[in-house]
Image (cartoon, rainbow, N blue to C red):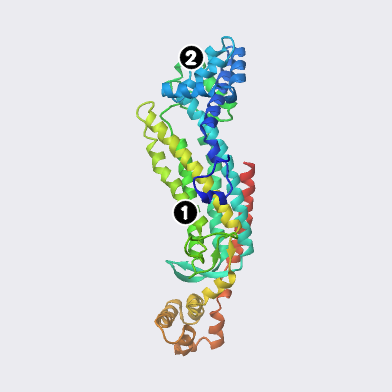
Amino acid sequence: MTALPSNPQDLRSPDPGIRALFRIERRWQAWLDVEVALAEAQAEIGMIPAAAAAEIASKARFELFDQARLVEGFRTSGHTLTPLVWELARLCDGDAGGFVHWGATTQNIVQTGDLLILRQADRIFHGQIAQVLDTMADLAEAHAESAMPARTHGQHAVPTTFGAKVAVWIDEMARHGERLRDARPRVFRAMLGGAAGTLASFGDAGFDLQDRFAKRLDMTAMATPSRAESDHLAEYVLLLALMAATAAKIAREIYTLQKQEFGELEEPTPPGSVGSSTMPQKRNPFMAQDIVAIAADVRMQAPLALEAMQTEHEADRTTSLQIRQATERACIATGDMLARMQVVLSGLTVKPERMRRNLDITEGLIMAEPVMLALGAAIGRQHAHDVVYDAAQAAAQGGPDFAARLSDDPRVAAKLTPDAIQALLDPAAYVGLSPDLARRAAAAGRKAAAALRTA
């Protein structure tokens, strides 16, 4: 029987595969892969026999393990790794089992193995961000000239376009992708320092061994292979938290603009969707709300990751558990968040006609700035500001509309004809370089997406 998700809404977005990466079986295999890299690197320098390394590599496959025996070993020992080492040693023929885990300590294997898992998640994130950027680029181009009210402090400011709004989203998401890409050399660092980070168990060959070990895993070696260092892992969680803040901002905007009072956007609502068990008319923005909630889960891992940096002495199980939990939860939530973002953005309904109607709800007040600038060219900016301010504030309180008040003001009429005033009150004519911003961002977004796919 197919396992069902804990949240029914998960069925509406594709599974990015992050949860599966963090299954214990996948972790165990990653740890075994690290044990193989260790054995092979040690064989290269003659620390253990080459035949032993080859035998270890041939048997370090989880499907060969007696799982019941393994589970019982973990139950009785209460140890993170030892039963896996025991079982691998038992599976090896000859004396090869005696060379398993030679000179290493648990966290060397577990932390480095967990980085193999994290690296797989990171590749998925790169692909997801690239897909989101391409979708945003399509939106920005398609609506480069779709005029709508810009809102500051929750109030109409001046006209913009929906494409320009999406340009902001592209700009931020592209930087998040860049940050993740740039962080790779800092994050994916192999640790092989032995019990207390001194490399004593490897003798004088310790540095050479760690370099060879890291190379086999396609990582850099930690300059100081200390079990007390976790800033690189904390950095990764913080980068995901930053991206989650952007994702939540975008989702909140989409959520708000779906309200009937705005009516400018609508997330995809497939046929048969039920918004409420009791109100048949509801078309609830579930996906946008999911993104906001899931993004909060990602950000909540940031404080835990920072706590995990405060390791006592040379090692501390407490902080090891903390960073593992923070990393796993942040990654799973990030995968779900990005999957939902793609669903929402790719199926987003944009309503330019409603945006245009909303531009007119203040009866011209949104165009106070161009009127002020046109009048200011004749009488000075500050004087013009005062004149237009008087007309705007009076119109906002009722009575004649903004255009009528401007036409009736002798200070305005002396410089601007009624036709000139009407032309200045056309919101579609005052979107500035918004279309260009949208098209430039679309091109930049596609370029950033391509870079992420090839990174």
* Image disc number at residue 292: 1
Could you tell me which quadrant the C terminus lies in?
top right
**Circle 1 sits in a helix, a strand or a loop, which is it?**
helix
- Between 122 and 393, the one nearer to me in the picture: 122
- Badge 1 vs badge 2, beta-carbon distance below 8 Å: no
Residue occupying the far left of the picture: 312
* Image disc number at residue 203: 2
- Between 15 and 34, the one nearer to me in the picture: 15
| Quarter residue 59 falls in | top right
Disc 1 vs disc 2: which is toward the camera? Answer: 1
Ranked by sequence position, the earlier of labels 1 and 2 is 2
- Between 13 and 387, the one nearer to me in the picture: 13
Using the numbered discs, state the Cα–Cα distance from disc 1 to disc 2 in whole angstroms.
52 Å
Q: Is residue 343 above or below residue 220?
A: below
Could you tell me which quadrant the N terminus lies in?
top right
Q: Is residue 191 visible?
A: no
**Image point 45% across, 16% down: which residue?**
200
Q: Position of residue 207 (x, y in %)?
A: 51, 21
The three-letter code of the residue at mark 2 reads: Gly
**Circle 2 sits in a helix, a strand or a loop, which is it?**
helix
The three-letter code of the residue at mark 1 reads: Val
Q: Is residue 424 above or below residue 30?
A: below
Q: Is residue 158 left or right of residue 56?
A: left
Q: Position of residue 278 (x, y in %)?
A: 47, 63
- Between 166 and 443, the one nearer to me in the picture: 166
Q: Position of residue 230 (x, y in %)?
A: 43, 33
